[in-house]
Image (cartoon, rainbow, N blue to C red):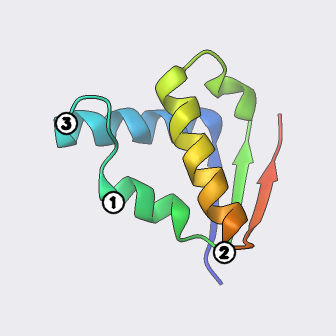
Amino acid sequence: MRVIYTTGEQFTNELIESIQSGRRGKYASNEFRKKFRNADVLLIDDVQFIIGRETTQEEFFHTFNTLYMAQKQIVITS
């Protein structure tokens, strides 16, 4: 079972790093998406950190939907 724990700040920082290293505008790299979307359990602490960060919220939304549709476990705390 693949369990990933991250904080809202860490998720945001990894997304920014992914965007900057990919140099593709506001789009995350496939490695970033694979890391979070292939989890069996995703734990996100301090999710309130992503409030007001439109690109991060959008990426998290798609990650959440992907995991939800695959019937994976998602735990969100704030």
**Residue drawn at (61%, 77%), measured in percent from left and top?**
2
State the image quarter where residue 39 is shown: bottom right
Q: SS for tag 2?
A: loop
Q: Amino acid at mark 1?
A: Glu
Q: Mark 1 Cα within 10 Å, few/some/many (few <14, many 20+)?
A: few
Instruction: Check contact, mark 2 vs mark 1: CB within 8 A.
Output: no
Residue marked by disc 2: 40
For residue 31, which quarter of the picture?
bottom left
Q: Secondary structure at mark 1?
A: helix
Q: Position of residue 29 (x, y in %)?
A: 30, 50
Query: Callout 3: few (<14), some (14-19), or many (20+) C-alpha neighbours within 10 Å?
Result: few
| Nearest to the observer: residue 20 or residue 6 | 20
Q: Comparing marks 2 and 3, which lies closer to the viewer?
A: 3
Quick one: which residue is furthest to the front in this view? 69
For disc 3, the marked residue is: 24
Residue at numbered disc 1: 31
Total number of numbered discs in the rendering: 3
Q: In screen coordinates, is 2 left or right of 73?
A: left
Q: Quadrant of the C terminus?
A: top right
Whichever of labels 2 and 3 marks the residue nearer the N terminus, that label is 3
Q: Which residue reaches farthest top?
A: 52
Q: Amino acid at mark 3?
A: Arg
- Residue in the foreground of this view, choosing between 55 and 31: 55
Which residue is drawn at the image coordinates 66% and 25% (left, top)?
A: 49
Which quadrant would the N terminus be assigned to in this image? bottom right
Toward the bottom, the furthest residue is 1
Outermost residue to the left: 23
At horizontal 43% and vertical 56% (from top left) the residue drawn is 33
Q: Is residue 52 above or below residue 63?
A: above
* Residue 25: x %, y % from top left: 23, 29
